[in-house]
Image (cartoon, rainbow, N blue to C red):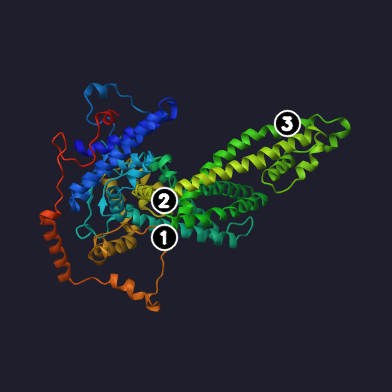
Amino acid sequence: MKLIVQVYCLLVNRMQFLREQSYQGRNQSISTTRANLCELVASQVLRRFDEDHCGRGGLLLLANILVAGFEPFQNAPDEVLREKPLPPHWPVQKRGGYERKLPALEVAIVSESKTFLSSAACQKVVDAVYRGQIIYTPLSFVDILPDHYKHSPVSLYDPRKAPLLNQDRLIVPRIRSIIEVCQFAVLLALYALTMTWRKGSQMTIVEMIFCIYTTGWILEEFAAIIEHGWQVRTQNLWSFLDITFIIIYAVYFILRMYALATGKLDPALLGLKILAIAAPVLLPRLAFNLMPDNMLFISLRAMMKDFTVLTLLAVWCFAGFFVSMKWLTYLLQPNERHQRLDSATVSKWMLWIWFGLDGTGIERSVDFHFILGPSLMIGFAFLGNTLFLTVLVAMLTNTFSKIVANETAEVQFRRAVLTFEGVKSDAIFAYRPPFNILALLVLLPIKFVLSPRRFHQVNVFAVRVLSAPILLLIGAYERRTLWRAPNGGPQGPPKRGKLAVWIFSGFSPHGDIQAVFDVRPPQVIVDKSQDSDIIDARRPENRLISKPSRQGRPDNGLQPTRRSMSV
């Protein structure tokens, strides 16, 4: 048990060193080095566990290391436990002693330990969790519809021994990703039908269905945000698109409800116009779902973050030019007050100059003052259009080059985020929109009336009834393909989020090259190859013999010095 906790402790220490380097200027480089060292040591420890424990038993051990819950004060002395502060943000929902526990995989995601997450041992567990070969009860921050009557330990899933209608399979990341893509496709189709068949102030049946379905979809997104916290949720590529659409829909919904209550036409038309601007958000979001491993989308998320921060800083700094021009308009002579310009016009001129679209603001700058006006406008043009855009392009280029240079680690990190976030603890995720609204309105009140066991039975029955076709398809598929590797070889990482590449080998002169690898070899040849490998491994010249070091221990190339271990 102590060896298993080592990885968790190393990752927690990495988080602490990263926090220290953010505010300790004199020890910034030391803290960064210590954080990187903790990540490397954790990777080596996990790799040694993987090498020493093979097969399904080793996979189960690695899963316990990464996804089992640990508490920072676990196994601490009693005097330390009496003095520990109770953070006010811990969830108040009871989970049978698992309230303050976090898995090592979540700590690695929060600390952005990309080297650790991209290691082969970690990716083996991530892929097994993604496929549903490893099952466990996730530890969430807070649940909207909690059902914690049963806590399943980390174990290997055998679909042949599980019930056919197994509602727990709905939280498998691979299955959830497929269901979420289908749900979003339905949302996009309803949105297109709503905007096509709109009727001004009258709400059509399609629009009513769109509003009900979108409300359920937003409820699921809100539950996903509070499942593991905003910091983990924002690691998704499409999180900023979801937040943008939720804001647009909220404004549209308020205006439409106000128009229905008052009978006015203008708010209804304004609401539809606001809903129309959601198209640039919804269409790219579907591409993000289908291709989450695409480097363009991965770099776009990081560049959007830099672009937003730099734009806010530029607006803050350049706001002084706008204030100066407004004050100059207020100080015009009485015979020149007809030239006073409103704030919208001044802002429009500055925005055009900022992006180099039009120079009307420079031509009309004499309206503020014949000397001070042009001076302010030309200074703003130099600083905003020339300096800001140059710095912005340089920063985005640097960000993109860093991500591309570390492409493998970035892709593996995104896969780990999607897998970890795909395993849900909240019972609300077992219901498809808009049935999740009905479950929230019906099941949440009766939870305070029924016992935990009885509520769990009611919840399981409702999920199995509403999701029976999906559960039947999942059970029939996994009983045949969950643990089966293609061609009898080892299972590799799953191809997730990528568009299928259709290869018509029959129409290609090189089709047999691929077809020969798709045919499984005879069992006799497989047995002979395995026997020859065993014979070769037993030969003395093929054995790995390590030379003893000066201290009498085998020299494996990883002998740390006393100074390096003092960190």
Residue drawn at x 60%, y 55% is 276
What is the C-alpha distance between the residues marked 1 and 3? 52 Å
Percent position of residue 407, x then y: 41, 50
Q: Is label 1 or label 2 in front?
A: 2
Residue kind at label 3, given as amino acid type = Ser
Residue kind at label 2, given as amino acid type = Glu
Q: Which residue is mark 1?
A: 498
Residue kind at label 1, given as amino acid type = Lys
Q: Are marks 1 and 3 in contact (CB under 8 Å)?
A: no
Q: Residues within 10 Å of mark 1 (few under 14, many from 20)?
A: some
Whether residue 62 is visible here, answered yes or no, is yes
Q: Nearer the N terminus, badge 1 or badge 3?
A: 3
Q: Nearer the N terminus, badge 2 or badge 3?
A: 3
Q: Nearer the N terminus, badge 1 or badge 2?
A: 2
Residue drawn at x 38%, y 51% is 408
Q: Mark 3 falls on what kind of element?
A: helix
Q: Horizontally, is 447 left or right of 310 in the view?
A: left
Residue drawn at x 40%, y 26% is 27
Q: Tell me which corner region of the image, top left, top right, bottom left or bottom right, holds residue 145.
A: top left
Instruction: Say which mark, if any, is on residue 324.
Output: 3
